[in-house]
Image (cartoon, grey):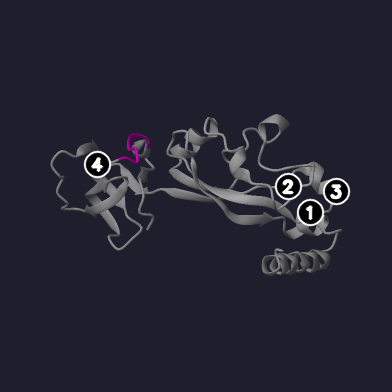
């Protein structure tokens, strides 16, 4: 279970109302799908302390001084995580100057770091929050002009972000290196999947060699 802020799928914007700060919050009268040992609770309470779940159940008492949010029977679930997305780095895919999710030229490949492309003012973030999404993995992609060169396998370094709002949306940078696979990967390697596998193996071996012999 994702032990962070809960979100709702029924018009109650709980995550938007709960900052990850030093306070105690009680979400009461909630129809809870805990996605954990507690299972489904038809009417229960969630206690959050310092932005993390402290207690959950049908008979949980509300601590003195806690800020109370009455869910009024609406559904509350753990926040959803988008595992591969360009949200926050691309606004309109068809409009070139609003898309910073990857490069289409220059020398960068695996070295492209998508964290520097993140836009906390993106209009897509609040839309995703309405669907129950609270975090995402922003995965860089090779843009069309770069694909035409057919000389790069890796599109850059991915980042984990929060959609909770505020200027600091980066949770962790450099969490993975993304690459083009399938038909696109084959095209990048010269037109054959076999060539892609060979080039990928060579690139990984070169990285291992460099790690052992940096000097």
Mark 1 vs mark 4, foreground winner is: 1
Segment tinted magenta in the rendering: 16-21
Looking at the image, is mark 1 or mark 2 earlier in the sequence?
A: 2
Q: Are marks 1 and 4 in contact (CB under 8 Å)?
A: no
Q: Residue at x 14, y 49 (%)?
A: 61
Q: Determine which residue is flagged by label 2.
A: 142
Q: Do residues under tags 1 and 2 come within 8 Å of each other at their CB atoms?
A: yes
> Separation of disc 3 and disc 4 at Cα?
54 Å
The main secondary structure of the magenta stretch is: loop
Q: Which mark is residue 25?
A: 4
Q: Are marks 3 and 2 in contact (CB under 8 Å)?
A: no
In this rendering, would 65 be left or right of 136?
Answer: left
Question: Marks 4 and 2, Cα distance to the nearest angstrom?
Answer: 43 Å
Image coordinates for residue 71, horizontal then vertical, percent: 26, 39
Q: Are marks 3 and 4 in contact (CB under 8 Å)?
A: no
Q: In the rendered image, which quarter is residue 16 located in? A: top left
Q: Which residue, given by chain and number where applicable, does mark 3 sit on?
A: 149
Q: Dots 3 and 1: beta carbons under 8 Å? A: yes
Q: Secondary structure under badge 4?
A: strand
Of the pair 79 and 175, the residue shown nearer to us: 175
Q: Mark 3 to mark 1: distance in Å?
A: 8 Å
- Which numbered disc, 3 or 2, marks the residue that appears first in the sequence? 2
As drawn, 157 above or below 23: below
First reached walking from the N terminus: tag 3 or tag 4: 4
- State the residue lying farthest toward the front: 215
Please name the residue that numbered disc 1 is placed on. 152
């Amino acid at each position: 279970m994702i032990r962070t802020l809960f979100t709702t799928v029924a018009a109650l914007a709980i995550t938007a109302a709960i900052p990850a700060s030093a306070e105690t919050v009680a979400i009461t009268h909630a129809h809870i799908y805990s996605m954990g040992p507690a299972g489904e609770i038809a009417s229960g309470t969630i206690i959050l302390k310092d932005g993390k779940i402290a207690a959950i159940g049908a008979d949980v008492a509300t601590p003195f001084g806690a800020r109370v949010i009455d869910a009024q029977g609406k559904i509350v679930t753990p926040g959803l995580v988008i595992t591969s997305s360009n949200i926050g780095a691309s606004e309109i895919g068809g409009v070139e100057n609003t898309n910073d999710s990857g490069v289409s030229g220059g020398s960068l490949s695996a070295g492209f770091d998508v964290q520097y492309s993140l836009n906390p003012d993106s209009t897509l973030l609040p839309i995703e929050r309405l669907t129950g999404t609270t975090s995402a993995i922003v995965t860089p992609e090779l843009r069309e002009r770069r694909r035409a060169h057919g000389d790069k396998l890796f599109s850059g370094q991915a980042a984990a972000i929060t959609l909770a709002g505020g200027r600091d949306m980066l949770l962790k940078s450099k969490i993975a290196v993304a690459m083009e696979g399938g038909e696109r990967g084959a095209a990048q390697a010269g037109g054959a999947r076999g060539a892609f596998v060979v080039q990928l193996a060579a690139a990984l071996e070169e990285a291992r060699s460099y790690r052992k012999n940096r000097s």
